[in-house]
Amino acid sequence: MNIKKFKKTIGEYYRKHGRKMPWRETDDPYRILVSEIMLQQTQVDRVAKKYPEFIAAFPHFKILASAPLKNVLRVWTGMGYNRRALYLKKIAETVVRTYQGVVPKEITELERLPGIGPATARSIAAFAFNMPHAFIETNIRSVFIHEFFPGCRTVADVKLMPLVEQALDKKNPREWYYALMDYGAMIKKQAHNPSRRSAHHAQQPKFKGSNRELRGKMLKVLIKKSHTLADLMKGVSVSRQQLKQNLNALQNEGLLTKRNGKFIIA
């Protein structure tokens, strides 16, 4: 498929089947940044349910920056990967302190914010400021592998990026990326997930019985009340060593701290 035909296919699909989402109905950089962090490694349907609650609780950077981490984690409950809630709070603190509450537009400055890598920085620039930066995420990757590399395996992003750059709508990158992502979501439902043919594909480990599940349970308990190690042992069915390892990890990440022998939200 050539680029011209490809862009026509994507555009026609989006005009007929484009999805409506709350973060697409605003150009507020704060709200768009929140949605982009939420969408990392999380299904759209789950984000769509939690996003309005989060925005209602923390409508702008100043409120989020000043909120206790415990409150942020309480609202975040059910989203998983709780470190992202900590990142959002740290981003808010940085934006208020360094940028007077305004999201920076420069990619280099966005990449300095906690939890924001190259792809997320460029997606924020595209959606918040309609700036034409090329980036790849899972749905975009699926689209280009499906359309340009049929039957190929272990397709590296380095092969996709020139096509992403060539196809980019520089006048309206925001809508173009919406269209790509919606087309990619459709492909994943109708065909075998093309992203599995990516050289960068990694199988998501099972949640049940994982450290992620354990960490979530621990934080859920500690949001309500501080506990000693002995207290936590009563509430989780894991070894003392595994519990201690996760407590240490959560402390190192800045989610927990220890005071007077008890673990509390930092």
Image (spheres, rainbow, N blue to C red):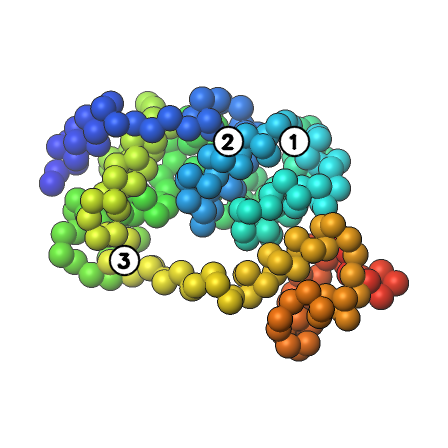
Q: Is residue 200 above or below residue 56?
A: below
The picture places residue 178, in percent across and down from the top left corner, at 34, 31
The residue located at (25%, 45%) in the rendering is 189
Q: Which residue matches tag 2? A: 32
Mark 1–mark 2 distance (CA, rounded to whole Å): 13 Å
Residue 25 visible to an observer of this rendering: yes
Q: Amino acid at mark 2?
A: Ile
Q: Which residue matches tag 3? A: 196
Q: Amino acid at mark 1?
A: Phe
The picture places residue 124, in percent across and down from the top left corner, at 47, 35
Mark 3–mark 1 distance (CA, rounded to whole Å): 36 Å
Depth check: 98 or 37 in front? 37
Foreground label between 1 and 2: 1
Q: Amino acid at mark 3?
A: Arg
The picture places residue 134, in percent across and down from the top left corner, at 35, 39
Q: Quadrant of residue 176?
A: top left
* Left or right relative to 50: residue 179: left
Q: Which residue matches tag 1? A: 58
* Left or right relative to 102: residue 107: left
Please, what secondary structure does the residue beneath circle 3 have? helix
Quarter of the picture holding the N terminus: top left
Please, what secondary structure does the residue beneath circle 2 have? helix
